[in-house]
Image (tube, rainbow, N blue to C red):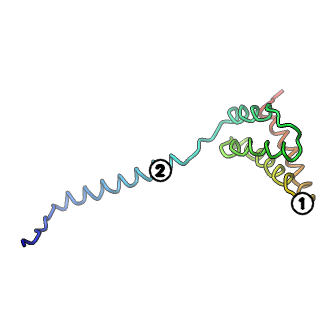
Amino acid sequence: MAACAHIQLPSAILEGMKKLTTALLAAGLLASASACASPKLTTAETCDRINVVVSSPTGSMGKTGMTKLANAIRPIEAVSSDDLKPALQAILNYADESVKEHPDSTKLEGLKADYQNAGQTYSKFCNPS
């Protein structure tokens, strides 16, 4: 059997291959990262989506209504504008606590003020007078 001969490539070609490999890996990582990143909505776009949610009837605002509200707001909050993100998070915090089988009344009372302020923030940005 004949032994395989090693082919010696010039160092310039090896360096070029290393740079190409590095560039391809970097491009692949960037493409992966950008595919996972969600776009951030503008304040107007966030308001449009919230208006759709609040205009849909959820029945009573008992536990079922609060659960439906929170489930509808959760995906909006994830991509919402910086102006409305804290307000949506306050609504979610209040809704999540209020629908528990045994809500913590002290915690719920503390979240209530933030929930009410969230309504004012919503009105300020989404229903300006």
Answer whether labels 2 and 1 touch (C-beta < 8 Å).
no
Q: Report the residue at 85% width, 39% height from top.
A: 120
Q: Is residue 7 above or below residue 113?
A: below
Q: Residues within 10 Å of mark 2 (few under 14, many from 20)?
A: few
Q: Is residue 92 above or below residue 47?
A: below
Residue at the spot of label 1: 104
Q: Is residue 55 above or below residue 83?
A: above
Point out residue 33 in the picture as x, y percentages from the top left corner: 50, 50
Q: Report the residue at 92% width, 54% height from top.
A: 109
Q: Report the residue at 92% width, 59% height from top.
A: 106
- Of the residues shown, which amino acid type is indicated by label 1? Asp
Q: Residues within 10 Å of mark 1 (few under 14, many from 20)?
A: few
Disc number for residue 91? none
The C terminus sits in image quarter: top right
- Of the residues shown, which amino acid type is indicated by label 2? Ser
Furthest residue toward left: 2
Q: Report the residue at 7% width, 73% height from top.
A: 1
Disc number for residue 32? 2
43 displayed left or right of 94: left
Point out residue 112 in the picture as x, y percentages from the top left corner: 89, 50
Q: Of label 2 and label 1, which has the lower sequence position? A: 2
Instruction: For marks 2 and 1, give the CA distance.
Output: 42 Å
Point out residue 62 in the picture as x, y percentages from the top left corner: 89, 45
Point out residue 96 in the picture as x, y percentages from the top left corner: 81, 52
Q: Quadrant of residue 123?
A: top right
Q: Quadrant of residue 82?
A: top right
Residue in front for this viewpoint, 118 or 107: 107
The mark closer to the camera, 2 or 1, is 1
- Regarding mark 2 in the picture, which secondary structure is present there? helix
